Amino acid sequence: MKQSYRVFILIFILIAALSFSGCSQQEDEKEQIAVPLPELGEPAELIAEYYAHYERRIEKVTDGIYVAVGYALANVILIETAEGNVIIDTTESVKAAAEIREDFQDISDAPVRAIIYTHAHPDHVYGSPVFAEDAGDNFAVYAHDSHYDFFSEQILLRDILNIRGIRQFGSELPEEYVIVNGIRREFRFDHGKHTAYVEPTEFFSDELKVNIGGREFVMIHTPGETQDHLMVWLPDEKVLFPGDNYYPAFPNLYTIRGSAPRDVSHWVESLDKMRALEAEYLVPSHAGPVTGSARIEELLTAYRDAIQYVHDSVIRGANKGKTPDDLVAEIELPPHLQAYPELREFYGDISFAIRSIYDRYLGWFDGNATNLNPLHPEERAEKIAELAGGFENLVAEADKAMENGEFQWAAELSDMILAVDPDSEEGRELKVAALMKLGEESYNINSRHYYFTQALELAGQITLSPEVEVEAGAAHAIPIKEIFKAMTASLDPIAAADVETSAEFNITDTGEVYTIIVRRGVAELRYRGYEDADVVVRVAENTWKELAAGVTSPALALASGKLKVDDLRVIALNQFIDLFDRP
């Protein structure tokens, strides 16, 4: 069986995601382009100031409550109880989590009674095995009912999410390019290896109240950054843990690493739920805590008002027939909201939010009939080159744009140059230079990293590795239904163009049955058996997940009896799986 079979359900993006595999845009035979280090200007200086939020430390919030800030992407929160410690969020890194646990030991060496995930993003779940090592009696892991839903689109779009996630977080950038990483100092997620995390044991829908060691915990569903998002409220101490629905930067209402448009109106409603609690302490999962009910009310109100202002401005403009480009050009926060340092666009970007909100309500079409079926970029570029008087004039115009400091226009022209001639060294050099300048000028850390990473890829200075090692435990965490759903999108339509075949998969330890029917370029998934299946497979759930992830070899699974094929139709199974190779 070909090793390429594994691509159809590779599960390494259990994140995030952000998630990720990729390949370099730059062909090996092309020469590298020398790229100077970014110049330090006002954007870099302001970003460096912003870093103070994420200096590494453990901060006491109030009696028995501590937060570890700056060790990795997300904070880890420690709450002491008479039955043991409760941990809220665990970072993305086992190594970082181990450093935090060691420092927490100086505060409390009690066993861990519970872990609470505010949501399923990797920076909140992947450090969990470290804290589970100290598990005490009646150990539980809490999450919202929709915790696993996040992974569906991540599996389907694993490759592109990997590339874009690496660019957004600057994961492959040289150290000199990174000042601070979004809403954290350092991203310690290993894109090349995905390990297991401790899966939730307790789920809830709207609200869950539990008493742990004499402390009352209230978990409330608060969709915002994700649909599975929850906040944690300690009513006796009036301490609120908002997860990622608040941090000191304009919120990431749309993430450029890729995601379905976030429901901004729900985010506002969730913030209103927080405000109603009149918390005395606010402990976000990024940056340090905030103390004082008046200050917390002020910040949460400004935050929700900024989100609603952008949302409502898009709705008003759309109703007047304005396009996303029109709206981006005219919408900005009112002066009193712009005055808040906590609403600077270091992490979220208002223009990205505008486009995402518009798309959520109206889709990609901007209402202009000209844009129903636009020219392909290559055809448009050829016509623009002809209009400019030839290819060389297009290059000259891009050079002129760089000289005039019109870096966005230079980048767009360089794309046209490369569309007309993909091998143009002039076009490549121009795009690298333009992206570097755009990165230098960007106050938004995600955009800054994306510009720099793509520039260095194009220059041949860095390569994004497609190799990802998946551990068995990480494979086990993915719902098997999502694995089979991902198969349908990974069918090779060319190889299957004239093929009609089917395979039935009996999951022996759960009793579930899945059938994939290949019908001339389309793979249909059925959640039941199929009397006319060409191949019938019998396999345990985790064995199939390990096979899908490449953790276990098919030959070994067959030899050991963990994978069985009725009537010994192994060759037919091999032929079926081969249909799912990438084109």
Image (tube, rainbow, N blue to C red):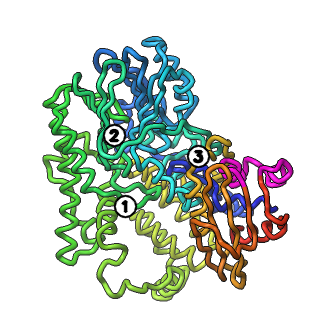
Which residue is disc 1 drawn over?
261
Q: Which span of residues is magenta-colored?
A: 539-562
Residue to which mark 3 is pinned: 172
User: As shown in the figure, which amino acid type bears the numbered disc 3?
Assistant: Glu
N-terminal label among 3 and 1: 3
Residues marked 3 and 1 touching at CB (< 8 Å): no
Viewport quadrant of the C terminus: bottom right
Q: Where in the figure is residue 480, as x and y percent of width and height?
A: 59, 54
Q: Say which amino acid is labelled 1.
A: Pro
Q: Position of residue 543 (x, y in %)?
A: 71, 49
551 in relation to 248, above or below:
below
Work out whether mark 1 precedes mark 2 in sequence or the reverse, and give the earlier one. Answer: 2
Q: Does dot 2 land on a helix, a strand or a loop?
A: helix
- Between circles 3 and 1, the one closer to the viewer is 1
Say which of 381 and 75 sits in front.
Answer: 75
Residue 302 picture quarter: top left
State whether residue 461 appears in this view: no
Foreground residue, 314 or 237?
237
Residue 66, percent across and down? Answer: 36, 21
Q: Helix, strand, or loop for circle 3? A: loop
Quadrant for the N terminus, please.
bottom right
Q: Which residue is mark 2?
A: 46
Q: CA distance from mark 1 to mark 2?
A: 29 Å
> Residue at the location (22% across, 23% down)?
236
Q: CA distance from mark 2 to mark 3?
A: 23 Å
Q: Relative to residue 338, is residue 240 depicted above or below?
A: above
Secondary structure mainly formed by the magenta segment: helix
Give 124 or 378, whichever is nearer the viewer: 124
Tell me if mark 3 has few (under 14), some (14-19) or many (20+) residues whose alpha carbon lies within 10 angstroms of its own.
some
For the point 34% across and 63% down, the residue is 356
Q: Is residue 541 magenta?
A: yes
Using a 10 Å C-alpha cutoff, classify the residue at mark 1 as few (fewer than 14 neighbours), some (14 to 19) or many (20 or more): some
